């Protein structure tokens, strides 16, 4: 089942159950505290907060999402993209837990021939918030599963809030067991084995204080209870397409294939290279989608996120062995796949290409300038009989020329040199502390108007370090 079919079926399933289909909003959140939309509920937030009256009681959407805090997991886990699409159904004071569970379970277990995902029941594990006895009872009633198949998880996993007083509630997630190749039996912390693909949030509580994800006060029940769910399109796609991970699905793998042609390397031959291939597939796509929605590269905020994604994509292809401009070869492949759904990518292509390719050119010049400095430094170390590039040198390359440490490490290794990585990290930490102090000073009396759970998303001119912002990472 290709992703467009999954998307279509999801929407059709919920439309048939009386939901209004709402198109994806821009991935740029219309919210002072969010850089990007990290979840499908964000465009509906005014309804959940009771600030606006929804024109419908039930909605279904497939929302473009970006989660920058997941960047370090990309390519290493089987399931994290910086960009992904979240399929969601929403009830604004209409149906609640039981119907939400029924609707989800029906779609997940219905045979593919009848329009569902056809996931085998004996591989599925609902999880509930440990204190949500009502959910346990409902899962048993709806699915007929025995008690031991229902995982009880704690607050950090299965309690949702926005990090501030306001609505909150327990979640139930649906996990699918991918077998012992991905972790031990019954170990739900092996998240690539017990793959979470759908989160059902039961918005029922009124929180009076939220000190952390695990520490909050429930003041009472919400007068109107809501449902907010999010199902990862790519996760369902890689399950139903029988591939190993989200980077190998129909709309992403062609970029890896093109990268193989360019680099002459084979995906699947070397674990380190494989991560690079996956990073390329993800970052080419996410940067294209960001530019499509109007972001341009810059030194702070959204622009810096985009810059970092583009540079990481370019560098990863370089490390795979292709030194020429790569984005003109790779981004059109991603466009052709994504434009099946997001047709404006075609209309906007000239602009997208201009922005992306100019950034690659600028980064190539950075690399060129920095490479000379690197070679000089490496020459000096060798001449003086040393074998280690100092932390100061690595830091200067990073700070002045934007040289990522792994590039410095790789280039040093090519010259038979080590790098004082601990020294480098120490200097980075010092800089980070300085940047945080600056950011705190700048932020001053920043009001937290209607914020989500706050998460430190570090970024800045040479790392994501110099700038603090508020962003949800996960719920
Ligand atoms: P995980 O624990 O795997 O990081 P999560 O608990 O952070 O996921 P939720 O916040 O519950 O994810 O989001 C709802 C759904 O969105 C998830 O169940 C998953 O299917 C999907 N999802 C979340 N983050 C990503 C991501 N970075 N890439 C792809 N899909 C994602
Ligand atoms: Mg999770
Ligand atoms: Mg989750
Ligand atoms: Mg997460």
Image: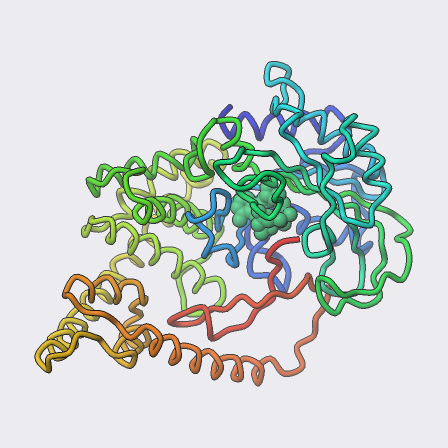
Query: In the image, residue 421 lies at what x, y percent?
Result: 32, 72
Residue sitting at x 54%, y 54% = 67
Question: How many numbered marks appear?
Answer: 0
Query: In the image, residue 445 lies at what x, y percent?
Result: 67, 81
Residue sitting at x 15%, y 66% = 416
Q: Which residue is farthest top?
A: 113
Residue sitting at x 85%, y 54% = 205
Q: Which residue is farthest front?
A: 185
Please tell me which residue lies in front, 113 or 25. 113
Residue 277 seen from this side: yes
Residue 276 vertical placement versus 256 (above, below): below
- Looking at the image, residue 152 sits to the left or right of residue 411; the answer is right
Query: In the image, residue 388 lies at what x, y percent?
Result: 21, 75
Residue sitting at x 75%, y 29% = 103
Residue 24 seen from this side: no
Specify the quadrant of the image occupied by residue 123: top right
User: Which color scheme does this rendered protein use?
Assistant: rainbow
- Looking at the image, residue 306 sits to the left or right of residue 89; the answer is left
Query: In the image, residue 346 lies at what x, y percent?
Result: 40, 38
Residue 417 vertical placement versus 51 (above, below): below
- Looking at the image, residue 352 sits to the left or right of residue 414; the answer is right
């Amino acid at each position: 089942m290709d992703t467009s079919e999954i998307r279509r079926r999801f929407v059709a399933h919920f439309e048939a159950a009386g939901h209004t289909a709402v198109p994806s909003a821009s991935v740029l959140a219309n919210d002072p505290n969010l850089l990007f939309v990290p979840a499908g509920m964000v465009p509906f937030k005014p309804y959940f907060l009771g600030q606006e009256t929804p024109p419908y009681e039930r909605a279904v959407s497939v929302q473009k999402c970006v989660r920058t805090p997941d960047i370090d997991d990309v390519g290493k886990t089987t399931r994290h993209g910086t960009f992904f699409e979240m399929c969601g159904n929403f009830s604004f004071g209409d149906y609640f837990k039981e119907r939400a569970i029924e609707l989800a379970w029906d779609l997940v277990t219905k045979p593919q021939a009848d329009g569902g995902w056809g996931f085998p029941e004996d591989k599925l594990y609902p999880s509930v918030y440990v204190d949500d006895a009502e959910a346990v009872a409902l899962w048993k009633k709806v699915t007929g599963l025995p008690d031991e198949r229902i995982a009880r998880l704690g607050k950090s996993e299965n309690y949702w809030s926005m990090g501030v007083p306001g609505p909150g509630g327990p979640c139930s997630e649906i996990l699918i067991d991918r077998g012992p190749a991905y972790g031990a039996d019954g170990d739900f912390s092996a998240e690539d084995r017990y793959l979470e693909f759908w989160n059902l949030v039961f918005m029922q509580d009124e929180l009076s204080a939220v000190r952390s994800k695990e520490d909050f006060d429930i003041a009472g029940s919400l007068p109107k209870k809501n449902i907010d769910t999010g199902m990862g399109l790519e996760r369902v796609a890689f399950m139903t397409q029988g591939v190993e991970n989200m980077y190998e699905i129909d709309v992403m793998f062609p970029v890896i294939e093109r990268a193989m042609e360019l680099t002459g390397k084979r995906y699947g031959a070397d674990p380190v290279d494989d991560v690079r291939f996956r990073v390329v597939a993800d970052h080419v796509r996410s940067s294209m989608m960001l530019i499509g929605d109007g972001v341009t590269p810059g030194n702070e905020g959204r622009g810096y996120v985009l810059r970092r994604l583009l540079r990481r994509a370019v560098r990863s292809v370089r490390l795979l062995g292709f030194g020429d401009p790569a984005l003109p070869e790779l981004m059109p492949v991603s466009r052709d796949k994504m434009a099946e759904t997001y047709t404006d990518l075609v209309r906007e292509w000239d602009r997208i290409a201009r922005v992306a390719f100019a950034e690659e050119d600028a980064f190539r010049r950075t690399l060129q300038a920095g490479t000379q400095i690197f070679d000089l430094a490496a020459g000096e170390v060798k001449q003086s009989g040393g074998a280690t590039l100092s932390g100061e040198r690595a830091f200067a390359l990073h700070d002045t020329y934007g040289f990522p440490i792994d590039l410095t490490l790789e280039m040093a290794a090519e010259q038979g040199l080590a790098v004082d990585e601990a020294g480098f990290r120490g200097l980075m930490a010092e800089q980070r502390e300085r940047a945080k102090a600056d950011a705190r000073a700048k932020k001053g009396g920043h009001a937290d108007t209607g914020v989500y759970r706050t998460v430190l998303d570090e970024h800045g001119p040479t790392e994501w370090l110099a700038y603090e912002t508020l962003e949800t990472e996960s719920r």
